[in-house]
Image (spheres, rainbow, N blue to C red):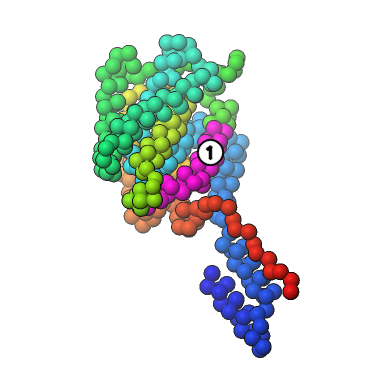
C-alpha cells in the first residue's frame, strides 16, 4: 500500500507543468489492487482438497481406514470452529451433540433395523440440532446475557452429565456402549471400511465446508465477526446478540450430530466417551492447534494432531502423550493463532464482505 501511494505521488509530480500523468496512476492502482486481492486461503484449501482426494491412492488399507476417521473428526472440529472461532462461544460440551447422535443412529440400527443413509444421517443431524437447541436455549436465551464462563461451565456440565447417564443406563449398554452396529446402507450396498466410505465422508465434509464458508462470508457472518470482537457494539447496532449466538450454536450442534452419525457407523460401535469431557476437550485442541476462525484451520489441526498422535503412539508407546502435550503447548505459546497463521494474514482471517466496488473509468475530455 505504501509503495502504491509513493508511486502515485511520483506520477503526480513527474510532469513539470504540474499535470497528472493519469496512465501512470491507473497502472499503479491496478498493481496495488492485484496485490491486495491476492488470496492465500483458496490456495491452502485447494492443496488440502487435492491431498485428500489422492490419499487413498497412495495409502495402505489400514491407513485409509485411519484417514476416514480423521476426516470425520475434522467435520466435528468444523462444528466447534463455527461456535468458538466465529461467535466466541467456548463450548466444552460439543461432544454431547456428537455422541448423542451416535447413540441415536446406533439405536435406530439395533432396535428398528434402520441403516439407510438417507434416514440415519438426517436423523443424526436432527438429534444434534435438537440437543444444541435445548442446551443453547437454556444457556444463551435467558433474561440477562450469559457470560463466557457460564456458557463454558454449562456445556461442560451437560457433557459430563450425558457421560454419567450413558454409563449408568442399561438400555444404552452401560459402560460397554452399543457394539456391532450394522453397516450403513444405500439400497443393497453396505458402506464398510475402505475407499468408498472414505470418499463418502470426504464429499460430505466438502459440502458442509462450502456451506459454512458461504455462511461466514454472508451478512450473518459479518454480524458474527462483530459479535466475537465486540458484543456490546453489535447490540448497540440493534442486533440481538444472544439470538445470534443461539443460532450458530444450534448449527454447530447439527454438524456435530452429522459427524457423530458417521463416526458410529464407521467404528461399528458407540461408547460413553463419545459424549464425555475427553472428546469435548479433544476438539478444542484440534481448533487451537490449526487456528480458530478460519474453518480450514480446524481441518488442518485435526489432521496434524491425529497424525502425530498415531505416529508417536506407534514409536514412543510409553511417553507419547507427554510429547504430544509438549508439542501442543509450544504451538499455543508461540503461535496463539494456530499453525494456519504461518501462511494466513489477519486481514484474510477476518475476510471481506459484500460486493467488490466497481472501477471508475475516467471520461474522455
State whether the magenta stretch is mostly helix, strand or loop.
helix
Q: Residue at x 39, y 26 (%)?
A: 130
Which quadrant does the N terminus fall into?
Answer: bottom right
Q: Residue at x 51, y 32 (%)?
A: 68
User: Which residues are drawn in magenta?
Assistant: 202-229
Q: On the rendered structure, is 364 left or right of 89?
A: right
Residue 215 image point, x, y percent: 50, 42
Magenta stretch encompasses residue 32: no
Residue 318 image point, x, y percent: 32, 39
In-front residue for pair 178/222:
222
Which quadrant does the C terminus fall into?
Answer: bottom right
The residue tagged with tag 1: helix, strand or loop?
helix
The image quarter in which residue 149 lies: top left
Outermost residue to the right? 364
The reply to whether residue 364 is visible in this rendering is: yes
Relative vertical location of residue 72 with respect to residue 285 in this rendering, above or below: above
Residue 323 image point, x, y percent: 34, 46
Magenta stretch encompasses residue 228: yes
Outermost residue to the bottom? 16
Q: Residue at x 45, y 39 (%)?
A: 78
Q: Residue at x 66, y 85 (%)?
A: 15
The image quarter in which residue 161 lies: top left
Q: Residues within 10 Å of mark 1 (few under 14, many from 20)?
A: few
In-front residue for pair 213/307:
213
The reply to whether residue 290 is visible in this rendering is: no
Q: On the rendered structure, is 11 left or right of 167?
A: right
Disc 1: which residue: 211
Q: On the rendered structure, is 152 left or right of 309?
A: left
Relative vertical location of residue 280 with respect to residue 37 in this rendering, above or below: above
Amino acid at each position: 500500500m505504501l509503495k502504491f501511494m509513493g508511486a502515485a505521488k511520483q506520477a503526480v509530480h513527474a510532469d513539470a507543468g504540474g499535470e497528472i500523468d493519469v496512465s501512470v496512476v491507473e497502472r499503479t492502482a491496478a498493481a496495488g489492487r492485484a496485490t491486495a486481492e491476492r488470496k492465500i486461503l483458496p490456495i491452502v484449501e485447494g492443496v488440502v482438497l487435492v491431498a485428500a482426494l489422492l490419499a487413498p491412492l497412495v495409502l495402505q488399507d489400514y491407513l485409509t481406514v485411519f484417514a476416514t476417521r480423521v476426516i470425520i473428526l475434522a467435520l466435528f472440529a468444523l462444528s466447534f470452529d463455527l461456535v468458538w472461532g466465529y461467535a466466541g462461544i467456548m463450548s466444552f460440551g460439543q461432544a454431547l451433540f456428537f455422541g448423542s447422535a451416535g447413540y441415536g443412529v446406533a439405536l435406530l440400527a439395533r432396535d428398528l433395523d434402520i441403516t439407510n443413509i438417507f434416514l440415519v444421517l438426517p436423523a443424526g443431524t436432527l438429534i444434534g440440532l435438537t440437543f444444541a437447541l435445548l442446551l443453547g436455549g437454556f444457556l444463551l436465551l435467558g433474561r440477562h446475557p450469559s457470560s463466557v464462563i457460564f456458557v463454558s461451565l454449562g456445556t461442560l456440565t451437560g457433557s459430563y452429565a450425558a457421560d454419567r447417564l450413558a454409563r449408568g443406563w442399561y438400555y444404552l449398554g452401560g459402560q460397554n456402549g452399543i457394539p456391532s452396529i450394522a453397516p450403513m446402507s444405500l439400497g443393497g450396498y453396505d458402506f464398510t471400511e475402505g475407499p468408498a466410505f472414505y470418499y463418502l465422508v470426504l464429499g460430505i465434509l466438502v459440502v458442509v465446508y462450502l456451506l459454512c464458508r458461504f455462511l461466514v462470508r454472508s451478512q450473518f457472518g459479518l454480524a458474527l465477526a462483530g459479535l466475537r470482537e465486540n458484543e456490546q457494539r453489535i447490540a448497540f447496532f440493534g442486533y440481538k446478540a444472544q439470538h445470534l449466538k443461539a443460532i450458530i450454536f444450534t448449527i454447530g450442534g447439527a454438524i456435530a450430530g452429522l459427524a457423530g452419525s458417521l463416526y458410529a457407523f464407521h467404528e461399528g460401535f458407540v461408547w460413553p466417551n463419545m459424549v464425555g469431557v475427553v472428546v469435548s476437550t479433544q476438539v478444542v485442541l484440534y481448533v487451537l492447534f490449526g487456528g480458530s476462525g478460519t474453518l480450514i484451520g480446524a481441518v488442518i489441526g485435526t489432521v496434524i494432531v491425529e497424525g502425530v498422535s498415531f505416529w508417536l503412539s506407534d514409536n514412543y508407546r510409553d511417553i507419547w502423550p507427554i510429547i504430544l502435550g509438549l508439542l501442543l503447548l509450544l504451538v499455543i505459546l508461540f503461535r496463539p493463532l494456530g499453525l494456519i497463521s504461518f501462511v494466513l494474514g489477519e486481514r484474510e482471517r477476518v475476510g471481506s464482505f459484500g460486493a467488490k466496488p466497481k472501477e471508475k473509468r475516467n471520461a474522455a475530455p
